Image (cartoon, rainbow, N blue to C red):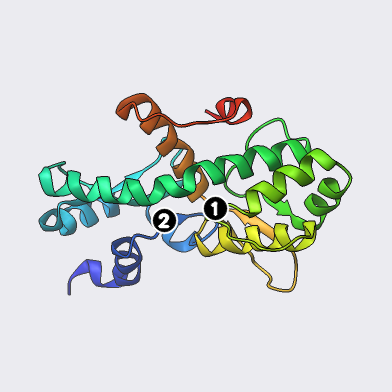
Amino acid sequence: MNPLLQHGPLLEKLLAGQFICAVTEPEHYQRLQQEALREQLDEYLQPLNRRVAQNDDTSVFFLAYRHIDQDAREHMKQQLQVVMASLLPLLEWLTYVQEALGHDSVLSPGDIVKLQELILKTEDHPSLQQRLQALAKDKFFNSQADSVDAQAKQIAKRLVEHGYLQQPHKERLFFTVTGKMDYLLELVRFIKDEENIPLEESPQQEDLL
């Protein structure tokens, strides 16, 4: 029997473009810590020109191209165009949360965002209300709401839909940051350092990078 058959669900998630981290897929994430399994998966994925990749902190696993040929480069450019539309609003959200909650560092995988606390902090500061309102109206979040409560909830909903946050209990406004957030920040650094693509960050966003 093919030893990879037992890892079929994991392969399906990876091939579907999902990001595997300790928050979203703890069992699969634990398995991917094994170098022998990653080598088996890489061998299986070789005809597809794919390999199992990870970020610098090993907080998230995903598929990447094995060799960057012309087809791969074109596909990556298309993906980058899609991702670029979400990069700046996500960076702005990170800096907004960091300022509102008084955190010394940017959110990382496993961190808990208590939305009600964030809402209360925002309601107490007009400058935070203005930042949240501008953020909520961005095309990526697409909120037409006027209240801080509704704007914050719409943003959180969109972040869950895109895999940056997970909501363990639907009836509670507690959200866990996933490994995809680390991937986002590393992607931004790559774009800035390797591709020389200008990003119009605010001074606060520069501090993240």
Question: Which residue type carries mark 1?
Answer: Thr
User: Which image quadrant: the N terminus?
Assistant: bottom left
Q: Residue sitting at 18 percent across and 57 percent down?
A: 45
Compare residues 8 and 126 and report the one nearer the observer.
Answer: 126
Residue contact between numbered discs 2 and 1, judged by CB atoms under 8 Å: yes
Q: Which residue is mark 1?
A: 178
Mark 1 secondary-structure assignment = loop
- Image position, residue 159 (x, y; %): 57, 58
Question: Which residue type carries mark 2?
Answer: Phe
Q: Residue sitting at 15 percent across and 42 percent down?
A: 67
Q: Using the rendered image of the protein, determine whether residue 53 is visible from the camera's viewpoint.
A: yes
Q: Residues within 10 Å of mark 1 (few under 14, many from 20)?
A: many
Query: In the figure, is residue 17 to the left or right of 156?
Result: left
* Of the image marks 2 and 1, the number of the one nearer the N terminus: 2
- Image position, residue 101 (x, y; %): 78, 41
Q: Residue sitting at 52 percent across and 41 percent down?
A: 88
Q: Residues within 10 Å of mark 2 (few under 14, many from 20)?
A: many
Query: In the figure, is residue 19 to the left or right of 177?
Result: left
Q: Residue furthest right?
A: 124
Compare residues 126 and 22 and report the one nearer the observer.
Answer: 126
Instruction: Place residue 28 in its image quadrant.
Output: bottom left
Query: In the figure, is residue 2 to the left or right of 140?
Result: left
Mark 2 secondary-structure assignment = loop
Compare residues 143 and 79 and report the one nearer the observer.
Answer: 143
Query: In the figure, is residue 165 to the left or right of 29?
Result: right
Q: Which residue is mark 2?
A: 19
Cα–Cα span, label 2 and label 1:
9 Å
- Image position, residue 37 (x, y; %): 28, 54
- Image position, residue 13 (x, y; %): 35, 66
